[in-house]
Image (cartoon, grey):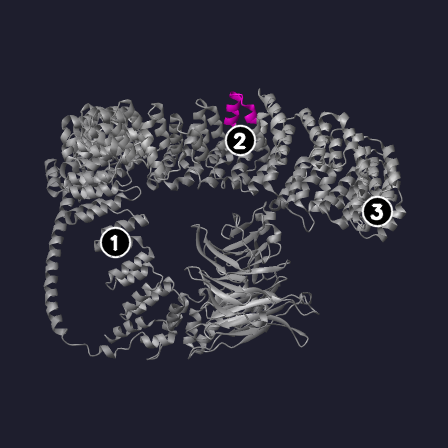
Amino acid sequence: MAQAAPIAMKEVLLLPSLGINQQYISFTNLTMESEKYICVREMGAATGGTNNVVIVDMATPMQPMRRPITADSALMNPDSKIIALKAAVPGQAADHLQVFNLDTKAKMGSHQMPDQVVFWKWISPTKIGIVSATSIYHWNVDGNSAPQKQFDRAANLNGSQVIKYMVSPDEKWCVLIGIAPGSPDRPQLVKGFMQLYSVEQKRSQALEAHAAAFASIKVGSNTQASTLISFAQKSMVNGQLVSKLHVIELGAPAAGQTPFTKKQAELFFPPEFADDFPVSMQISKKYGLVYVITKLGLLFVYDLETATAVYRSRISPDPIFLTSEAESVGGFYAINRRGQVLLATVNEQSMVPFVSQSLNNLDLALAMAKRGNLPGAEALVGQNFERLFALGNYKEAAVAAAESPMGALRTKATIDKLKGVQVQAGQTSPLLQYFGTLLTKGKLNPLESLELGRLVLSQNKKQLLENWMNEDKLECDEALGDLVKATGDSDLALKIYLKAQATQKVVTAFAERGQFEELVKYSGQVGHTPDYLYIMQSLLMSNPQAAAKLAVTIAQQPGPPVDVNTFTDLFLQRNMIREATSFLLEVLKPNLPEQAMLQTKVLEINLVTYPNVADAILANNMFTHYDRPRVAQLCEKAGLYMRALQHYTDLSDIKRVIINTHAIEPQALVEFFGTLSPDWALACLKEMLSVNVPQNLQLVVQIAKEYTEQIGSKGIIELLESFKSYEGLYFYLGSYLAFSEDPDVHFKYIEAATKTGQVKEVERVTRESNFYDPEKTKQFLMEAKLQDARPLINVCDRFDLIRDLALYLYNNNMLKYIEAYVQKVNPSKAPEIVGALLDVECDESFISNLILSIRSLLPVEPLVAEVEKRNRMSLLTTFLDHLVSEGSTDAHVHNALGKIIIDSNNNPEHFLTTNPHYDSEVVGKYCEKRDPTLACVAYKRGQCDDALISCTNKNSMFKLQARYVVERMDLDLWAKVLDPESEHRRQLIDQVVSTALPESKNPEQVSVSVKAFMTADLPNELIELLEKIVLQNSAFSGNPNLQNLLILTAIKADGTRVMDYINRLDHFDGPAVGEIAVGSELFEEAYFIYKKFDLHVPAIKVLLENIQSIERAHEYATKVEEKEVWSELAKSQLEAGSVKDAIASYIRADDETNRDAVIAEAKKGDSYEDLVKYLMMVRQKVKEASVDTELAYSYARIGQIGQLEDFIVSTPGVNLQSVGDRCFDEGIYEASKLIFTSLSNWGRLASTLVKLEQYQAAVEAARKANSSRTWKEVCFACVEKEEYRLAQLCGLSIIVNADDLEDVSEFYQGRGKYEELIALMEAGLGLERSHMGIFTELGILYAKYKLDKLMEHLKLFSNKINIPRLIRVCEEQMHWKALSFLYVQYDEYDNAATVMMNHSPEAWEHVSFKDVAVKVSNADLFYKAIAFYLEEHPLLLCDLLAVLSSRIDHARVVDVMRKRENLPLVKPYLLSVQQSNLVAVNEAVNDLLIEEHDFEGLRNSIETYDNFDQLQLATRIEKHEIMEFRRIATLIYKKSLRWRQSMQLSVDDKLYKDAMETAAQSGERELAEELLKTFIADGNKECFAACLYTCYDLIKPDVALELAWMNKMTDHVMPYMIQVMRDQSSKLDTLMAERQERIKSEEKTEDDSAKNQQSNMYAQMLPPALPSPMQYQQQQGGMYNGQQQGMYNGQYQQ
């Protein structure tokens, strides 16, 4: 048999199976900082547009965690769920670093690096190493500190890619590794560079290396570990390829320490791996091995200490780019490009045999076995031990035995052998050397611990034993505890018993020490049941507090052995109220419904005795299930009124209690009202006010404030109003006012405040509130007649009730408030005040003075309006004069002054023309009824156009109006007066024509007027006017604008005059007028104008576009012979469809500008011969690819393939792709073939060849194109033509792309080509790029068309198919066996079981169903399965139940079987689960045994399993026809402590021995005496004597003697009496002996006290059995620390 490899490799995970795209399995996207997590960055293209980070927890690898995170790099912390992210800063050459805790979702740190980070790595659980282009930093993420620079990069790393950065465990050394391309002659041989940096020395060393790792090792007997570095290099030296592994020590060793000797070894690369190189190195701390992993998957294993080669193998066919240490198993993880996560571990069973046999290195094998505790070296260790022992090297032999791998020599035989060695004085025994070595290495086994204990205790050095116990160096057992207890140290013995889990010994020890609480606690932990009642009764007499604690401890045990009521009664019988309360409070903490009675009891006893305690209990809300009405009554009696309120549920009770407000804390009462309904709350408030308003008003108001929303403000207000408590209303509404918008509430508050004299508050509310009814409030305040009128002023001022205010104040002679209001509060309301005062005939002097007192603040306009309405304008004369004299320019002031002047006729024209401040419109309107001429003066001054027009129209003043309009020169005004709807337009026009314009000498006025006529669409009037101006030698005759206007007007109004005007006028704008003539369809006139002004191009455009005469246009072009004219003609010809003529015209015009249109029209007309001529002309003028492209297409279209080929060769700029596409689209396949061949456009060429039905060539072109679309096109075409071989070649290249697989499948299936499709998929299975989709699709095809192959396919490739998709197909096709198999493979065991049961003929198989059943998660399926088996496979039901026994509810199973009357069928199952000791199971088994008359089985059952209704069973069988069953009934009664019934049954059956034993076991004297009397009554003397013997301890001698004497059985009582006398004499002898012993002990004590004065002079001369501590420490290599040395030295000195 071949020997197993020393290194085991296994695939633990395949990353693509987790949905990770293979393109992201690379060094830049994937990180693995430790054996715990793998972190992968996925970019948006593969994840549906989002960037994700996938975190794979290696503990649960099939449940990856995806987070939508955008980052350039992501690192998971090696220990915990902390992620570090790196992202580039936009627009800067810098990176931003962040660290997040994924569990708490909190940011731990953030920093922006000034440079780009080229590499980073966690170097410890709290620290990140950061490598930039120039420096290395360390960042501690625990604090808020920034990264700290450590050192600069060495020059040898410039231009290299950093792949590793590490720090030694003591953080004194750092190493940075990078790789770079090899030399130009061999670039594939990658170079490796390493920078080693000393933190202490702050120096770097540059080396050549590809991989490195730090390690710690103890050399020889050194006490301190040496720090080593191992590195691997592969480089060219003198033309030779050298590969080596180096192991060296870093730093100088400490004084007295042996240095590590530098080691090196060859790395042998096979010839086929000549260019391979190391990419990683891992060192196993557990086994001391160096793992060197190369890029191409080679693994080299070396021994760290000796650098000896151990093993080499290729572990991966795919390149490896990342490794991570697997510290827990002493191996490493490796990830290759295929996404495999490989785990390499040491094969412990074969490593040592491999080294010793295959490598023939016994020393290394032995060293590795010792170091890693590996098996396989037992024979070597044994031989070495025997050799050393035989040579007398006992010390070395002891050490070898202690250090033997796997404890091979740690046996009793070895200890006995070492014990037998004779040791000379002063030397350490080999046995002690053996134990010392073991104590240094680790922990002793039980045998060794016992032997060492004997040795130490024999020398009275128990302290050493305690120290080793504390250090957990010994493995304790009961024998060691007994050994220590024999020395009298019960404390240490108890510790040993506890560690050894010797339950009975521990309980005994606790009982002996009186530590009952510890006993209870320990018993509960280990499942031991002591006699708790006895313990409790003992404690109640000595320590009640401890008894309470004990009771709590017992009661809190699951299934307490003593009932809580029993404990409670024990306390209450002794009137220990406090202890009972303490106990019950602790026990009743769960607050369960079944504890209601106890909750009531604890509250009752305290409400009667300690009400304050009951109040505290209720305050803590500990209980919710007690009798609340009962507690409420007790609370009321105890004076706890608040608690009574909280418990009463009847309104009458609450009202009775709530009036005791003097004894209830107000805040608590307020909170209580929050629990009442609104109606009850109002009733209680009413009750409180009814009893004592003064006392309870404040409290009622406080409650009302607190619960306004719940109770409702309306009810509260009505309640307070019913008691006429305005004070209460005032205080309540004062708090509620800010939150209410109810006008009634605000009014009632004002009313309450007024009636309580709170005038300031009334003033404030009327000033600030926005919600009261102003009219109602005003009326109330007026009726209240307050001396302070400010509240009324606030209301009237805010709500514009000024007139009412003024009248009230005037009528009540409160003129000072009028003055104050006008002067200080609101001067703007003075006009209304003045108006009201004028209405009541107030003194004008008062009004005048009032106005003058605020003249600068008074609004003039409303004041004037108020006075003007009352025709009292003269009252304002003085006021207005004052304002004017003060320099006022207010228009309202001057308006009022002007009105006064106009009314007084005091030279109004002068005022109207000279005053610049009045409002012309206001004053003009005032003048209209008085003098329209004055109104027009005012309007003209202010340019009030509308007002002036209206006034002149109304008064027929059209001449004035015409002059005004002409002078204004405003087109908008003209538009208004010339409006056709105006009835006065004609009169105005006549005045303008006859008077206004003839008078005007201003050209601008004429121009604006003409424009106005034109805008008003008055052409006839305008022509008449213009003919007078232009044609009659006026000053404006030669004006070009007027000539243009005349012609244009004629064009618009009278076209017959246009030709005459054209001939007579020479100064008009020809191009503009011609264009307008064209627009007016006067084409001949336009043509004449263009011809008159030599405008040839516009002229021919008129001929072509308007007159539409191509013949006249051709004649005109021939006449003028201009290229522009020919171009215009060519455009028209082209538009008319005369392509040939158009091309000829374009050639004469030498015009290529419209080439796109020419090409388009030529294409439409299929005039490609003429187009070729045109394009040849165009190519002479322009060099454009588009022209060449069209020319090439024209060649192809007319079939000139030769010219086309020459043209393609000679013309490089042709867009051949578009030409080829067009040719292909139009079916010119030969041309397109030529073009696509020249372009090497294999995809389009393949499509063309398909059209030409050249399928073989099409396949070759598709292979070159290697495009999914092309492959599909060729494939589908081949299928259509039944070229299945070629179709399969194409299909194989398609189906490797999962996105296209479905298209191929649908195409084949749509045409019924099932066999060919299956053949294609089967061929695809062997492809290197085969994926899950192929296997899945083939499974679907088998399910649909070849069912016989489906199961085989599923079994072979279940791990490579998309199971959910195939499940749906199998379900649709009703392939139940396959469906159940798929559910099992997908871990959907519930569905699998359901399918098997629902479709059992096809899907069910017993063994498979059992495997599935134990894994289902839905417990209901268990019972469905049981029902299924009962129906279809009853004989296999027990087998199923045996499998499910750990997961089903046995009681429910029993219930099911009982209902179906099938209990006997599952008897084996019931017997197997009876060990669970469940009621239902036990009773079912007992029923079966009774039915089977198996009394032995029944006896065993009830003795072993006691959890059943014992009394019911006993009652059932106590009258059984078989005596043995009746005996079992007596046994059950006996177990239930029903001694009398048990004894009576035995007596009835004449089983006197059983009756006697029952009486004896009961411990009840009455039963024993009753049994004696029964025997006497029956005359059974022998049984009488036997009962005396059996119940000896229960029967008093006097009773026995009396019964015997009275019934003449003295002889039969004599044996009993003899024994009584013997016992009494023995007790007397014992007492006498104890007395003698006590006397002797006192005498001996006196002698010993005299002897103790002398010291034992020989004690120091005795040789110690153990070495001195210092010597022992030196021998053991520092096994003990300094503190222990001191302790031991002190002990020896004593």
Q: CA distance from mark 1 to mark 3?
A: 120 Å
**Residue at which label 1 appears:** 508
- The kind of secondary structure element at disc 1 is helix
499 to 1007, vertically: above or below: below
310 to 1184, vertically: above or below: below
> Residues at badges 1 and 2 in contact (C-beta under 8 Å)?
no
Q: Position of residue 1371 (x, y in %)?
A: 60, 34
**First reached walking from the N terminus: tag 2 or tag 3:** 3
**Residue at which label 3 appears:** 1178
Residue span colored magenta: 946-961
Residue 1601 lies in quadrant: top left
**Residue at which label 2 appears:** 1432
950 part of magenta stretch:
yes
Residue 916 lies in quadrant: top left
Q: Which mark is nearer the camera, 2 or 3?
A: 3
Q: Is residue 416 visible?
A: yes
Q: Position of residue 282 (x, y in %)?
A: 54, 65
Q: Amino acid type of disc 1?
A: Thr
- The kind of secondary structure element at disc 2 is helix
